[in-house]
Amino acid sequence: MTRIVSAIARALSMHSDRAFGVVGSGNFHLVNALRAAGMDFVAARHEGGAATMADAYARIGRRGGVLTVHQGPGLTNALTGIAEAAKSRTPLLVLVPEVSSPRSNFHLDLPALAKGIGAGFVRARGAADIPAPRELSAQGTVMVALPVDVLAADSGEANERETPSVVVSEPGGEERFPLSDAEPLLERIASARRPVFIAGHGAVMSGAGPALAELAERCGALLAVSARAKGLFVGNPWYLDVSGGFASPLAAELIRGADLVVAWGASLTMWTTRHGRIFDPDATVAQVALHPGDLGSHTRVDCGVVGDARKVAECIGAALVQRGFTSKGYRSDALRERIASAVRWRDVPYEDDSDGERLDPRTLTIALDDMLPEARTVAVDSGNFVGYPAMYLRVPDERAFCFTQAFQSIGLGLPTAIGAALARPDRLTVAAVGDGGFLMSIAELETVTRLGLPMLIVVYDDAAYGAEVHHFAPGGHPLDTVQFPDRDLAAMARGFGCEALTVRTRADLEPLLSWLASPRESALLIDAKVTSKRGAWWLEEAFVGH
């Protein structure tokens, strides 16, 4: 093994304790060097799965992600997962062997590919070229091209400077945010009568939860989150859960009633704002974001502050304390009671569509929520079903919900759950997937069983690409291209070494309790045959503009 590869591996070990990938001739020696440097290596069955595992591992854990692929098709196989990470600004290093000759069948324009999916790019000819952990936290996903001559070179043939020691600081650092930069937002918060805070991924990454809860208490704000930050304010009586298309009727009503909405590290996409319609047109919309380009990039913003969410919240909170300012704002005893009794989706009445052959996904998910332990991580794929596990399954905190949805690809849910399970082995990981996404990623069931991950995999099985069925059916279009014969997914899972159940009624779930009470030596897959009489409540919003 060359000294250069060893030095690069040591630099990479500062980012994470685990790398994910599929090994080919191009990255064989690099993977061995990573292992020699003390990193675990998780071999996936497909590069797309490996990319998403690394993404989820970084999101749920507190270290960056590392992905290594073979040159050429190894990278192109992984591009969907890398694009998801890049659009989510996950701190992920993508290690790609690079061939220099354009005549090579493996040649790709790596800088152009990275730019096209929104990732950073660096060409590393030695350890000193590897971005430091703090740099990666600011940049998000970075593609690292490793020229094959470097990977094959011995000492003296390429840049092999040792990487200097790096101290990884806490998110946001310790310097105080200047009050002058926060003054416009401070005045708006102080004058608001019905403020609502919406915290997003940036708030999670900066550790802003306690500061935001304290500031909200002082000014009487209600608390909501983007889907990426679900769980941030669990236990707070003023928590409305997710804003936007997933919002319950009461949550949407209260957000609409706000005279001031402040987004803290939330990009305010169409999903979080219902294309801007969830806010009162007369409400003031403010946004705190790390990058100037994020301010107002998705919806109108009347007041923007560039800064770390935690620091800005602490700055404004300290100024209000100095003023002696307090306000009940939006809060009242009557509203607290309304939130406690009606803000959760499970408390909203519905007509149960279960028919004995297929189970209403709401009934299914409420039953699962009652059965599962509180210590859980929920990983959700995309599809018509997505709102049910996202909004009917509770999570204990903001690091317990993994939502790889920025690129809106199906098929990422199972590898998401694998990465999350490895990051938090102390919690039960629940993979919630549709039958279409599950079958796209079924090869990774072998990874689940090989790693011995005792996770629960729930397949919301309507034997269709349900989102397309419900979107196009009203127009009278033929649906045979998006509907499929019903298959025994439980039998397929057993073939991979999982335990499995087929569920058509609430009573069919009872064996789950026995599995939960057991040592859980293998994963359990539930093939839940769900009804498909109607599209999910969020579907109409989701397809606006499509």
Image (cartoon, grey):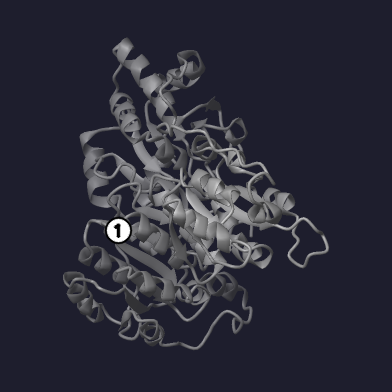
Image location of residue 505, percent across then percent down: 28, 81
Q: Nearer the viewer, residue 150 or 234?
A: 150
Q: Is residue 166 above or below residue 545?
A: above
Q: Nearer the viewer, residue 14 or 201?
A: 14
| Quadrant of the drawing holding the C terminus | bottom right
Position of 117 with respect to 11 (left or right) is: right
Image location of residue 45, percent across then percent down: 50, 72
Visible residue check, residue 88: no
Position of 73 with respect to 395 (left or right) is: right
Image location of residue 341, percent across then percent down: 23, 50
| Quadrant of the drawing holding the N terminus | bottom right
Q: Residue at x 26, y 63 (%)?
A: 369
Q: Residue at x 28, y 28 (%)?
A: 217
Residue bearing the label numbered 1: 425
Q: Is residue 158 above or below residue 70?
A: above
Q: Nearer the viewer, residue 424 or 204?
A: 424
Amino acid type assigned to the residue bearing label 1 in the image: Pro
Label 1 secondary element: loop
Corner quadrant of residue 354 = bottom left
Q: Is residue 81 above or below residue 114?
A: below
Q: Nearer the viewer, residue 537 or 384?
A: 384
